[in-house]
Image (tube, grey):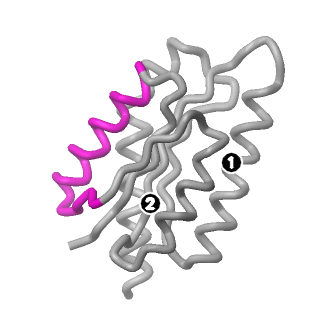
C-alpha cells in the first residue's frame, strides 16, 4: 500500500475543504492510504509543511491542495510561482513525489469552485503514478 500525506491550505477553505475530502476519496479508491494531514494558513506555508512530511520514512508521496484566487494585484502570480518552484526543489531533494493541486494563478472564485474536484483528483493520481515509477 502507498502511504500519502496531504497539505491543505486553509485560505479559501470553502474550496479547499472540498478538495481535501475528494483527495481522500480518490486516494482510497486507488488503494492508497492518507496517513497524515497538515492544514496550513495559506499557500505560502505549503512548502514548509511539505518538507516536514517528506522527511518522514512512512510517507511515500505528498499531495498539496490550495486555491490562490486572482485579486487586484499580481500577488496570486508571485505566490503560486514561488510555491510551485519550491515544491519542485523539495521533491527532487527528498526523492519523493509531490502531487500539485494548487489552483492559480489567475483563477477566479467561480473557476476554482468548478475545478476543485478535478484538481484534487489529478494531484492524487499524479503522486501515485510517480510513486509507481520510482519503485520500478
**Could you say which disc has been placed on residue 56 in the image?**
none
The CA distance from mark 2 to mark 1 is: 14 Å
Q: Where does residue 102 sit, x and y in percent of width and height?
A: 55, 39
Picture layout, residue 94 above or below residue 8: below
Q: Which residue is mark 2?
A: 62
**Figure quadrant of residue 103:** top right
Quarter of the figure with the N terminus: bottom left
Picture layout, residue 125 above or below residue 70: below
C-beta proximity under 8 Å, tags 2 and 1: no
Give the magenta range: 14-35
Judging depth in this view, the residue of 121 and 11 nearest the camera is 11
Q: Which residue is mark 1?
A: 83
Would residue 62 appear left or right of 128 to someone viewing this image?
right
Q: Main secondary structure of the magenta part?
A: helix
Picture layout, residue 109 above or below residue 90: above
Q: Where does residue 2 sit, x and y in percent of width and height?
A: 27, 70
Would residue 100 appear left or right of 85 to someone viewing this image?
left
Q: What residue lies at 52% left-to-right and 40% top-to-bottom? A: 40
Q: What residue lies at 70% left-to-right and 57% top-to-bottom? A: 86
Q: Where does residue 24 sit, x and y in percent of width and height?
A: 26, 46
Which callout, 2 or 1, points at the residue further toward the start of the chain? 2
Q: What residue lies at 58% left-to-right and 47% top-to-bottom? A: 46
Crowding at mark 1 (Cα within 10 Å: few <14, some 14-19, many 20+): many
Would residue 69 appear left or right of 120 to someone viewing this image?
right
Quarter of the figure with the C terminus: bottom left
Q: Secondary structure at mark 2?
A: strand
Question: Please, which residue is most extreme toward the right here?
Answer: 73
Amino acid at each position: 500500500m502507498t502511504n500519502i500525506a496531504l497539505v491543505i491550505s486553509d485560505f479559501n477553505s470553502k474550496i479547499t475543504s472540498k478538495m481535501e475530502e475528494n483527495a481522500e476519496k480518490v486516494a482510497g479508491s486507488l488503494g492508497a492510504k492518507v496517513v497524515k494531514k497538515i492544514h496550513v494558513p495559506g499557500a505560502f506555508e505549503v512548502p514548509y509543511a511539505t518538507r516536514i512530511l517528506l522527511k518522514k520514512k512512512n510517507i511515500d508521496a505528498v499531495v498539496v491542495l490550495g486555491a490562490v484566487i486572482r485579486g487586484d494585484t499580481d500577488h496570486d502570480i508571485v505566490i503560486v510561482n514561488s510555491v510551485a518552484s519550491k515544491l519542485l526543489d523539495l521533491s527532487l531533494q527528498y526523492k519523493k513525489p509531490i502531487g500539485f493541486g494548487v489552483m492559480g494563478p489567475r483563477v477566479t472564485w467561480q473557476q476554482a469552485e468548478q475545478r476543485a474536484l478535478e484538481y484534487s483528483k489529478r494531484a492524487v493520481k499524479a503522486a501515485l503514478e510517480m510513486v509507481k515509477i520510482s519503485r520500478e
